Amino acid sequence: MVTVSRIVKSFLITHAVIFTMTVQVSAQRSSNPKERAAPLTATPATYCMGTHDVGRLVFGITNFGMIGIGEGRGLRVDCFTGILVPLGEYPKGSNTTYFYKGGLWVGAVVGKDTLVSTGADFNNQSREMHPVADMTRRSILNPDSPEYTDAISEQDYVAVYVDTFTRGVPNQSFDPIDNRSHKPLHIEVTQQSFAWSYGHTDDFVIINYDIKNIGPRALQDVYVGLYWDADVHFGQRNVNISPDPYGRKGITGGRDDLSGFLFAAPTQFETCDFLDTVAIAWTADNDGDWQVGGFQVPDVTGIRFLNSSLYKQEMSFNWWIYNYNSTYDFGPQQIKNYRYMGNGLGTPYGDRNKYALLSNGEVDYDQVYTCEIGPSNPTWLYPNQRVSYLASRGSDVQYLLSVGPFDMVPGASLGIPVVFVAGDGFHNISWNYSHNLRQNYFPEAYYEGVDFTSLVSNALTAGRVYDIPGIDTNNDGYKGKFRVCVLDSDFIDGQWVAAVAETTYYEGDGIPDWKASAPPPAPEIWLYPTPNGLRVRFNGLRSETTRDVFSNKVDFEGYRIYIARDDRETSFSIVAQYDRENYDKYIYTSLRGRNPRFVRMDDPFTLEELRCLYGGGPDPCADSSFDPLRFTRVQPYILLQFPDSIFYFETHDYNQSEFGVTTPIKKIYPDEPRPTSLQNVDPGQLTEDGYLKYYEYECYIDNLLPAVPYYVAVTAFDFGSPQTGLEPLESSKTITAKSAYPNNEWDQAPDEVKNVYVYPNPYRNDAGYRVLGFEGRGQEDRSRDRVRKITFANLPSKCTIKIFTLDGDLVREIKHNFDPSDPNSSYQEWDLVTRNVQLVVSGLYYWIVEDENGHAKIGKLVILM
């Protein structure tokens, strides 16, 4: 368990943390700096919001510097998919919220002016950044897609925006301190964000800001910050709740959060203990919203700068609690730098106060320690006692994490990589909050009852994705910072000398790599309905031939087939698996300074490889009597020539490797030989739709309900890397899952309109369809009236559905237009909502289905509400 040490906390309470070294800023003058300035009255590009949702962390990101939906600013819909963007959710599908909004802040001294440009501000909808190019989306998932070009992750978003538009733009900002409208710095920001679905990378999203001075004047003492308003609570936005008077949020919670700054966390390698610098600002619910049966919001989220050279600058972490009453608007203030922020001690109003917060070089004490700040504290201003009591126990907190200073001449650029990261299991003791903060005030004991382990691990993993430790990216001989752990020593000439030591790199070489260890690509998948079942076909060419980006090995191990009734990751259950027959070798190691143990050091071995190594007879490779599983931990294998060489074997995974025998997965073309080349392929080696036959597989799933759709995913997984300690990785279930209805036994000739039918008919309000799982699965946050459905089945792939009252009034018209090859082409759902967006009433209705050739079928439908 990782907890905040008392030493670190006391240090943060009594001292400001100052970093003094500098970071390099690239500078390049244009031939005419005045030509670089964006026009002040030009028209911005289209405002857009995308959704990061491939991993467990889900939130919206814009092309004008804001992250999350916040008040919306007129944007709540993903401009790529047309789907409503949720408040920041973690984990995906849990209906919990960990993030409201945030955004980029950049401040600088320009001549005699102190200016700040913001991508998001507190409790208002003003805009100071505006797009100059359409937002783009990229992905490494499909090499045949146009989005694949230049992609870095499974889900990239790229945006370019400037702060130079001052007229003719929506929601213009106003500085209430200087009594003026927004005054630009003249900067251009290229924002790139990256997300992955892999098991070790799906808890964070990396955002890289490239900030460029496009104006004619130098920007001095530049500070860059990330403003964050988390709001942790169960549920998403509730339109039925009145807006929060303190922030107009209109949400169900998020007013009892705690925030803080974790500078370092302990780590261990072998027998050596180290401290890892994480420098992460975090937010969590104060008590995890404990209910009988468990926590509703047990996790924690945070922000961290990724480039370790930024830690050599001055770093600031400042939190505050907004209140319209200036007496209660509060944030920690050091006595030597005391400043009224425009509405009190907390919320920074106007550019002057925002810049003061960006540049103060202070790391505030954790929110939970507010009550420990007494009137005689030599460093921190004594807080209002009512505010102090509430802040220490949870409130609607906001914060700013910032770094600087930098100087930027015209044309200079500055790169700031950050990660928005989440961690599981922050809360694990139900009574921790009530015993240690609410009823009593024992903040040290409270911290002992929470766990930062997952958050720290994920934050460090994000750093390794950004810049891989031990990799010399630019081939200059430097691989990054490393540690040496001494495992064994000899006493020589009166002193101990290291005899056995292991070196581990914990930082990269400072050159971004943007690479995550990845599983094999998921196979291509097709679904074909069968009576009360589905036929799953997939092609694993890419899965079985793609090399790992780090090891350069083809590390494919096998496939898993999953099925679910909705597309949430937690809903999927495994129905079939294939994995290669191979074995792990565990070697007994006994060194001073290290506990004796069996360790897996190599990649899995095939049976043939083990027989050649350890079989008997004149031809060991032909020794069919050698069975690696005869040698166990209790009765290991001992090499006769080397009695200190002791090891045993275990199956790697389940060795379900006989198609159609130990696994229901079968090869469609079992006699097809492996192709000798993937470039020069004989046409006879290809299926009718152009796929290599050797990599074609199928599996039948039977005994399914024909009236509901099922989601099926086929994943590929590798065998991991014992050398790097990386566990086996598996491709995402949710990203590539496809849905289909199993056929009813009477489903036939869907191309003929005469075979159309409707179910359930009658539709009964008292039938409990939602409870039985026939509607509303995965939509628990929606009201019952928004998840009702009636299904039209056995439809032609292209037709028009019309529902009428007995009086002939049109209730709803639905255009059904599917590719005939789509397994769902013969089904269409109706949500029982009229064309006037009203719920239908009880009654008898007529429906008409008409195909493209004018053929029609008329039927009756009874609805009992």
Image (cartoon, rainbow, N blue to C red):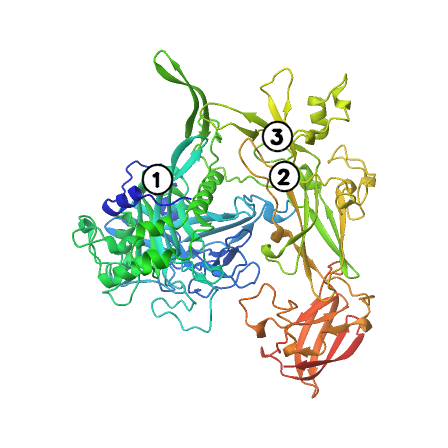
Left or right: where does residue 813 sit relative to residue 198?
right
Q: Quadrant of residue 559?
A: top right
Q: Are marks 2 and 3 in contact (CB under 8 Å)?
A: no
Mark earlier in primary sequence (2, 1) = 1
Position of residue 282 measured from the top left corner of the image (x, y, whole percent): 38, 51
Position of residue 181 measured from the top left corner of the image (x, y, whole percent): 31, 62
Q: Nearer the viewer, mark 1 or mark 3?
A: 3
Viewport quadrant of the N terminus: top left
Name the residue beneath numbered marker 1. 311
Left or right: where does residue 324 sit relative to residue 659?
left
Mark earlier in primary sequence (2, 3) = 3
- Please tell me whether mark 2 sits on a helix, a strand or a loop: strand
What residue sits 74% from the left and 67% below the top? 798
Left or right: where does residue 731 sit relative to residue 620?
left
Name the residue beneath numbered marker 3. 634
Distance, label 2 to label 3, CA atoms, is: 28 Å
Q: Amino acid at mark 1?
A: Tyr
What residue sits 34% from the left and 39% below the top? 311
- Please tell me whether mark 1 sits on a helix, a strand or a loop: helix
What residue sits 77% from the left and 16% below the top? 618
Q: Residues within 10 Å of mark 1 (few under 14, many from 20)?
A: many
Distance, label 2 to label 1, CA atoms, is: 36 Å
Distance, label 1 to label 3, CA atoms, is: 50 Å
In-front residue for pair 747/122: 747
Q: Please indicate, yes or no, whether residue 107 appears anywhere in the rendered image.
A: no
Name the residue beneath numbered marker 2. 718
Q: Amino acid at mark 2?
A: Asp
Mark earlier in primary sequence (1, 3) = 1
Position of residue 81 measured from the top left corner of the image (x, y, whole percent): 57, 60
Q: Nearer the viewer, mark 2 or mark 3?
A: 3
